[in-house]
Structure formats: C-alpha cells, structure tokens
Image (spheres, rainbow, N blue to C red):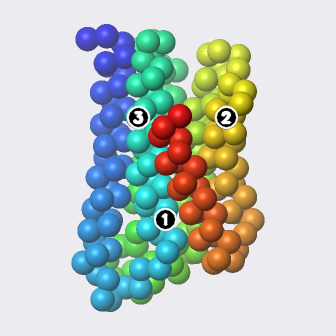
C-alpha cells in the first residue's frame, strides 16, 4: 500500500462519515417536515457540506503524487476532514429539540460557518507549509479565498436574507470548484 493509499483511506473514512451524516440529516428532515419548518439555510449548509466534501476528495486525489505518510499529513488530514463531521452533526437539531431548522441554524450559525471555513483554510495553511505558496495565483486564489471569506463574512451578517444569499453563493462557488 502506498503512502497516498494509506492516508487516503483514513481521509475517506472520515469524509464518508460526514457525507453519511448529511444524507441522514436530509432523511430526518424529510421525515419530520410536517412537524419542523425546514427553511432555506440548513438545506444550503447541508448541500455546501456535501459539495465541500467532494471538493476535499477531489483536491486530495489531485495531489496524490505528493502525499507522504507522516504525523503532519495525518494531522492535516484530520483537521481538514473533522470539521465536516462536526458540522454534519450540529446543523440538524436532535429529535424534538427544535420546531424550525432556520431557527436552529441561527442559534448555531457561528460554529457552523467556522466549520465551513476551516477545511479550506487548514488545507491552504498545510499547502503553504509544504510549498511556500499559500495559493496559486489567478482563479485558484479567487476560489479558495471565496471558500474562506464567504462563511467568515456571514458571521458578521445577522439577517436571514443575507445568510440565505451568502450560503447560496457559497454553494455555487463550491459547485464551480468541483470543475476547476
């Protein structure tokens, strides 16, 4: 087994757990839709998490040739993947805890938004440590800056409309990022 295969197995397990949590949350949301108002923000966060997870997998796969096994690689992989698992559990309320997913989002949005910004930020820091470049110039820089900046800017925007629009823009950026 190569170093890439070894580390990618761990990374895939953690990211797979996060994806499974999101899909389970969607199923719970659908099942409870007559009791809990769904709203817009939680589905946008959930879709952003799923697409963010896909982006993490694609980015890791693209950099496979340079992967070396070691403590810093395992720590970096964990610091990128674990916020997705955390957010995938926090974004949905426990059964009977809430009557509105939108209210739940606004009660927990700071931690959710930080969890959305953390993986690309950690990835960029580890890339910078390895290559000396925080991000390659051009569209790549714009993409990663947007992935980090949008959730951080939404921390300052308490309004529902701004959060909905910002999460929608983030989702579009993430979808575009899959094809970069």
Say whether residue 19 is left or right of residue 86: left
Q: Which residue is mark 3?
A: 57
Say which label, 2 or 3, has the lower sequence index.
3
Q: Which residue is mark 2?
A: 139
Question: Residue 93 in the image: x percent, y percent?
Answer: 40, 73
SS assignment at label 3: helix
Residues under numbered marks 2 and 1 in contact, where contact means CB atoms less than 8 Å apart: no
Question: Of circles 2 and 3, which is in front?
Answer: 2
Q: Is residue 150 visible?
A: yes
Say which label, 2 or 1, has the lower sequence index.
1
Q: Is residue 82 visible?
A: no
Q: Residue at x 62, y 16 (%)?
A: 130
Vertical placement of 159 versus 17: above or below? below
Cα separation, mark 2 vs mark 1, equals 24 Å
Question: Residue 40 in the image: x percent, y percent?
Answer: 49, 75
- The dot on residue 44 is 1
- The dot on residue 86 is none
SS assignment at label 2: helix
Question: Residue 80 in the image: x percent, y percent?
Answer: 50, 37
């Amino acid at each position: 087994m190569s170093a890439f295969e070894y580390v990618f197995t761990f990374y895939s397990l953690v990211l797979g757990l996060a994806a499974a949590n999101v899909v389970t949350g969607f199923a719970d949301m659908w099942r409870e839709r007559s009791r809990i108002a769904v709203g817009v923000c939680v589905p946008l966060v959930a879709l952003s998490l799923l697409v963010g997870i896909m982006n993490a997998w694609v980015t890791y796969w693209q950099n496979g040739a340079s992967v070396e096994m070691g403590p810093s690689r395992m720590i970096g992989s964990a610091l990128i993947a674990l916020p997705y698992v955390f957010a995938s559990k926090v974004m949905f309320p426990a059964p009977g805890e809430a009557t509105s997913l939108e209210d739940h989002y606004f009660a927990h949005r700071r931690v959710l938004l930080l969890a959305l910004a953390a993986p690309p930020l950690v990835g960029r820091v580890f890339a910078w440590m390895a290559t000396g470049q925080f991000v390659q110039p051009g569209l790549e820089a714009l993409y990663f800056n947007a992935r980090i900046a949008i959730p951080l800017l939404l921390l300052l925007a308490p309004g529902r409309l701004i959060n909905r629009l910002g999460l929608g823009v983030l989702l579009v950026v993430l979808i575009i990022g899959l094809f970069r």
